[in-house]
Amino acid sequence: MSTMAAEKFDDRLWSAIGDPTRRRMLDLLLVEGDGTATTLSQRLPVTRQAVAKHLGVLDRAGLVRAAPAGRERRYRVDDAQLARAAAQLSSVGSEWDARLQRIKRIAEAIQRTQHIEHD
């Protein structure tokens, strides 16, 4: 990854998104609009306490925002932060595409050179 991309890449954000349970939680929150640790734990194969911990990670990464709702907190996805994550992913994908194209050109040049040498 280039230095510029590395500066734009948010490790906390991607560590949060990297966990499959947290990605599933984000999916549920996007579909349902919001949720609590209790409601999310009913839809996931983990305990309410585990969901609460995962929500804390997502909150610290800025991917969700919490609002008090009685004795619980209702979580919603932060659309701006999610858009930022998508933009970072797109940027990284573009950089890898460019790298792969360079590797392909090098491999083709080597193949042409070897073909010429064997003729």
Image (spheres, grey):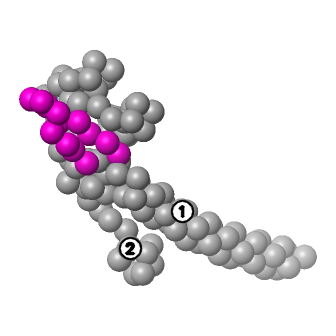
Magenta-drawn segment: 65-77
Give, as a three-letter code, the residue at label 2: Lys
Q: Give the residue furthest to the right.
A: 119
Residue located beneath label 1 in the image: 90
Q: Is 68 inside the magenta-drawn segment?
A: yes
Separation of residues labelled 1 and 2 (CA atoms): 12 Å
Mark 1, secondary structure of its residue: helix
- Label 2 element class: helix
Left or right of 49 on screen, residue 30:
right
Q: Counting other residues with Cα less than 10 Å from the Cα at mark 2, is it few (<14), some (14-19), or many (20 or more)?
A: some
Residue 86 in the figure: left or right of residue 6: right
Residue 49 vs 13, above or below: the answer is above
Q: Is residue 44 magenta?
A: no
The residue under the point 90% across, 76% down is 119
**Is the residue 25 above or below the residue 91 in the image?**
above
Q: Which residue is mark 2?
A: 8
Specify few, some or many for label 1: CA neighbours under 10 Å numbering under 14, 14-19, or 20 or more: few
**Vertical comparison of 77 with 27: above or below:** below
Q: Residue furthest left?
A: 71
- Picture coordinates of residue 109 (x, y %)? 75, 78
Q: Residue 61: percent from the left, percent from the top?
A: 25, 55
